[in-house]
Image: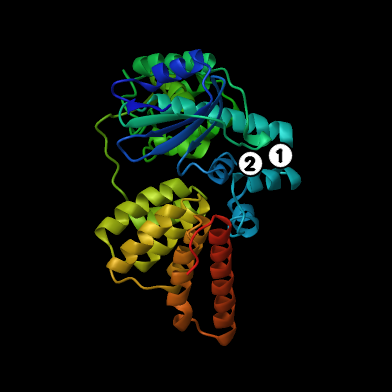
């Protein structure tokens, strides 16, 4: 039996409480009005995992400094099988992190994702009861009550912080009183955050690099109280670069989600810019948003943007989504655009392989074979 409804009528903290009290097992699908989507996995009332669309594990590892963008793109991103499980296994086998440290990292990420969901105030949820399969590396038993208590505390504390920090979009900067810096006793990571208070970076920008927006806001709030940091809630920072240039910087740093945000805005104003589509498609690919690749490949076609590389990624995205016939159709479209007979032969073999795979699947599932 499904439990569903608008978040405005049953907030997510109360919903988590209900699922915990009734010891439910199943998957909670959530979508807010900004088209953000998430899945929360419950087992006997406990949260065992969370997935938020676009928040692929590669992005979290790169942002935290655990894995370099170069290692991800050179060794993992373009493999056929590079889901979160494959990336996790590589992180452990390559010695980037040992298994206990990786599990600790992942558990913190799951908890932070839940706290982010608790901030959603609109949208729709649907809980489907039933068993599910998760790899042991991605299976935790986090007490829902603990998440609710911490989530509620954060919401209450955000109310207090909002007197000085009404939004994560505000841009803090150091005050003109350098003597006050002598009073600070900070950890190395906190000094790195201080270095970003240059009147250009918002709190959200800093959180994109250093994580945990809540903890960063608390640190900055304390420094505002001490007079070390000042803000102007009405401040707007003039962009010295256009959205495409900013997106390139984000992409080069492996901050794919920010690159995507900038590129979406840029393409609205410049719908025929090939370079923007290429970077956007690569960013979607890096974060495993294959449906978005197909969507924006269609947008490119509608705006008369034709490019072999876009078509290749469009075909791969359909393949990743299991839509074999559409993948083959895209490969057929690019056949005549390839430069060498060798490349054409590879495409021919790939098309035959995809068609045969599709035929066998239909046969196994009892579908009609044309």
Residue pictured at 48% horizontal, 24% vertical: 215
x and y percent of residue 200 in the render?
Answer: 37, 41
Q: Nearer the viewer, residue 227 or 345?
A: 345
x and y percent of residue 304 in the render?
Answer: 29, 71
| Quadrant for the N terminus in the image | top left
Can residue 226 be seen here? The reply is no
Residue 199 falls in which quadrant of the image?
top left
Check disc 1 and report the residue beneath it.
Answer: 97
Check disc 2 and report the residue beneath it.
Answer: 66
Q: Nearer the viewer, residue 323 or 155?
A: 323
Can residue 233 be seen here? The reply is yes
Label 1's element? loop
Sequence-first tag of 1 and 2: 2
- Rendered position, 11 above or below 328: above
Residue pictured at 44% horizontal, 65% vertical: 326
Residue pictured at 55% horizontal, 55% vertical: 365
Label 2's element? loop
Relative to residue 340, is residue 74 drawn left or right? right
User: Which residue is at the far bottom?
Assistant: 341
Label 1 and label 2: CA atoms lie apart by 8 Å
Q: Pointers 1 and 2 in contact (CB under 8 A)?
A: yes
């Amino acid at each position: 039996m499904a439990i569903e409804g608008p978040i405005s009528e049953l907030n997510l903290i109360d919903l988590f409480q209900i699922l915990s009290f009734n010891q439910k097992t199943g998957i909670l699908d959530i979508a807010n009005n900004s088209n953000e989507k998430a899945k929360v996995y419950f087992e006997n009332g406990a949260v065992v995992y969370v997935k938020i669309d676009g928040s692929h594990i590669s992005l979290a590892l790169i942002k935290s400094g655990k894995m370099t963008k170069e290692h991800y793109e050179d060794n993992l991103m373009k493999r056929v099988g590079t889901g979160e499980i494959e990336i996790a296994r590589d992180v452990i086998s390559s010695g980037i992190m040992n298994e206990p440290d990786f599990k600790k990292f992942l558990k913190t990420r799951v908890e932070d994702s839940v706290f982010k969901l608790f901030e959603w105030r609109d949208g729709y949820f649907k809980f489907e009861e039933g068993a599910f399969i998760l790899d042991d590396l991605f299976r935790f038993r986090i007490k829902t009550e603990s998440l609710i208590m911490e989530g509620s505390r954060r919401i209450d504390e955000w109310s207090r912080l909002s007197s000085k920090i009404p939004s994560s979009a505000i841009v803090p900067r150091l005050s003109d009183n350098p003597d006050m810096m002598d009073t600070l006793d900070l950890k190395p990571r906190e000094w790195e955050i201080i270095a970003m208070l240059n009147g250009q970076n918002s709190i959200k920008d800093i959180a994109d690099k250093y994580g945990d927006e809540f903890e960063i806001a608390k640190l900055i709030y304390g420094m505002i109280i001490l007079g070390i940091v000042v803000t102007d809630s009405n401040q707007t920072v003039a962009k010295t670069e256009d959205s495409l240039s900013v997106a390139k910087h984000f992409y080069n740093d492996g901050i794919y989600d920010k690159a995507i945000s900038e590129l979406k805005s840029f393409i609205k104003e410049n719908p025929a810019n090939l370079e923007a589509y290429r970077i956007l498609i690569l960013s979607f690919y890096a974060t495993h948003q294959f449906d978005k690749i197909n969507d924006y490949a269609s947008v490119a076609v509608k705006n008369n943007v034709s490019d072999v590389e876009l078509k290749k990624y469009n075909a791969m995205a359909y393949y990743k989504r299991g839509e074999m016939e559409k993948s083959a159709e895209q490969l057929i479209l690019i056949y005549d655009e390839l430069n060498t007979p060798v490349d054409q032969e590879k495409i021919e073999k790939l098309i035959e392989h995809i068609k045969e795979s599709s035929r066998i699947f239909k046969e196994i599932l009892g579908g009609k074979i044309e």
